[in-house]
Amino acid sequence: MNLWVACAGLLCGLVVWALLVRKLSVRTWEQHGVAEAPGGPLGDVGALSQPPARIGLWVFLAVVTSLFALFIAAYFMRMGHGHAAMHGITDWHPVPKPEVLWLNTASLILGSVAMQLARRALHSGHRAGASRWLGAGGAFAILFLFGQLLAWQQLRSAGYALGSGPAGAFFYVLTAVHGLHLAGGLAVWGRTVARLSRRATELIDVRLAIELCTVYWHYLLLVWLVLFVLLLST
């Protein structure tokens, strides 16, 4: 039953994610949520301290946190704790963890660092630096996703396919759900890169978008670290 609840949570998370992506792709909240004023490279922040997009992101992150919490709870229960232990379920056989997962983790860490540097460069008014670090943040995220696909391939080659057992199934599901959320972030990242590359775009027009992308990258890094420790320890 817990797995069905987790699947329902996943569906709700995907719906909220789709709505968030649509919201973040609209320019109006950036144009009206921040006011330009003299006194700095980007001007001072306007009167609207909490734009709708920022609120929407935090609501979305709360939903995603609940989703992963459900998956982790189902993971422990299916592994043989709690309800499963009372019913004598002992078919849990851990799967080997591909070494490439360590490189993938390093890629995600570097991507998060690059996004933070892009945010810092933007606040300093350095357009070239912001563009360079923003591109690096997305490139490391893409490298992470390719690394995850390689980990799947290595597991299948070792005889651990999706239907090989509950431990393997959870490995594929947890990494797939995390990867889908990262791919959704890359969609918004791509739009931001395209806008920043246009010379007619003012830095202040992409300030909030880069800030939200950075927060999202940091969050997905934190989620992956939790999942990675969970997979390694079980």
Image (cartoon, rainbow, N blue to C red):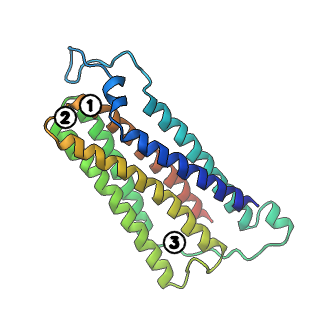
Q: Secondary structure at mark 1?
A: helix
- Does any portion of residue 68 appear in the rendered image? no
Mark 2 to mark 3: distance in Å? 45 Å
Q: What residue is rendered at 34% in x and 23% in y? A: 32
1 or 3: mark nearer the eye: 1
Taking depth in this image into account, of 145 and 54 the one nearest to the observer is: 54
Q: Which mark is residue 205?
A: 1
Residue ranking furthest to the right: 86
**Relative height, residue 210 to residue 183 (above, below):** above
Taking depth in this image into account, of 93 and 74 the one nearest to the observer is: 74
Specify which label sits upstream in the sequence, 2 or 3.
3
- Does any portion of residue 131 appear in the rendered image? yes
Q: What residue is rendered at 25% in x and 50% in y? A: 135
Tell me the quarter of the picture where residue 144 sits.
bottom left
Residue ranking furthest to the left: 199
Q: Amino acid at mark 2?
A: Thr
Disc 2 to disc 3: CB gap under 8 Å: no
Image position of 209 (left or right of 65): left
Tell me the quarter of the picture where residue 127 sits.
top left
Disc 1 to disc 2: CB gap under 8 Å: yes
Percent position of residue 173, x then y = 57, 65
Q: Amino acid at mark 1?
A: Asp
Image position of 170 (left or right of 100): right
Q: Which mark is residue 230?
A: none
Q: Amino acid at mark 3?
A: Lys
The residue under label 2 is 201
The residue under label 3 is 97
Q: Quadrant of the C terminus?
A: bottom right
Q: What residue is rendered at 34% in x and 51% in y? A: 111
Percent position of residue 162, x then y = 57, 76
Query: How many residues crowd around disc 2 within 10 Å: few (fewer than 14), some, or many (20 or more)?
Result: few
Percent position of residue 24, x then y = 39, 40
